[in-house]
Amino acid sequence: MHTVFIAGHAKLPSGMAAKSIYDTLTITAEVDKKYGVIVTASCTLATLHGREYVQQLLRGHSLQDGIEKPVEEIRLHYLGKAGNALISALKDLYKQYEQYTQT
């Protein structure tokens, strides 16, 4: 297996469609072990469009380069209520990646 599956979690703000289904927002990513590149990503946003947007934003990014660029992309381009939760979940995912690479 050349990839690893990593998940990051964050609390959702109240008043969101996804909040009625989940209490937390989860971002999952399949990451290439050698280069840290996100092969594919998913999240628990309520709409397919939102989930696809996050996937497009993260796919191809190398976690070896840190997480600042995708965090900034979310800040600038994702204008939904879940923006801060997406950033928190992404930071949690990165923390899980760092722990993985240190083992």
Image: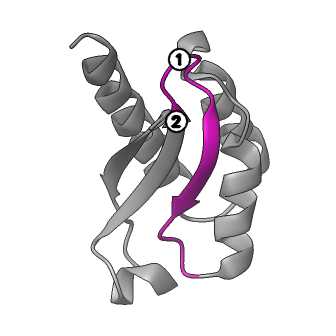
Query: Is residue 47 among what the camera can see?
Result: yes
Dot 1: few (<14), some (14–19), or many (≥20) neighbours within 10 Å?
few
Residue name at image x 74 percent, y 45 percent: 57
- Stretch in magenta: 32-46
Give, as a three-letter code, the residue at label 2: Val
Q: Which residue is mark 2?
A: 31
Residue 25: x percent and y percent? 39, 63
Q: Is residue 38 above or below residue 24?
A: above
Residue name at image x 36 percent, y 89 percent: 20
Nearer to me, 84 or 47: 47
Q: Is residue 9 above or below residue 16?
A: above
The C terminus sits in image quarter = top left
Query: How many angstroms separate mark 1 from mark 2 (CA)?
Result: 9 Å
Give, as a three-letter code, the residue at label 1: Lys
Q: Is residue 59 left or right of residue 81?
A: right
Residue 29: x percent and y percent? 50, 47
Q: Which residue is mark 1?
A: 34
Nearer to me, 61 or 46: 61
Dot 2: few (<14), some (14–19), or many (≥20) neighbours within 10 Å?
many
Q: Residue furthest left?
A: 103
Q: How many marks?
A: 2
Helix, strand or loop at label 1? It is loop
When asked about the image quadrant of residue 58, the answer is top right
When asked about the image quadrant of residue 63, the answer is top right
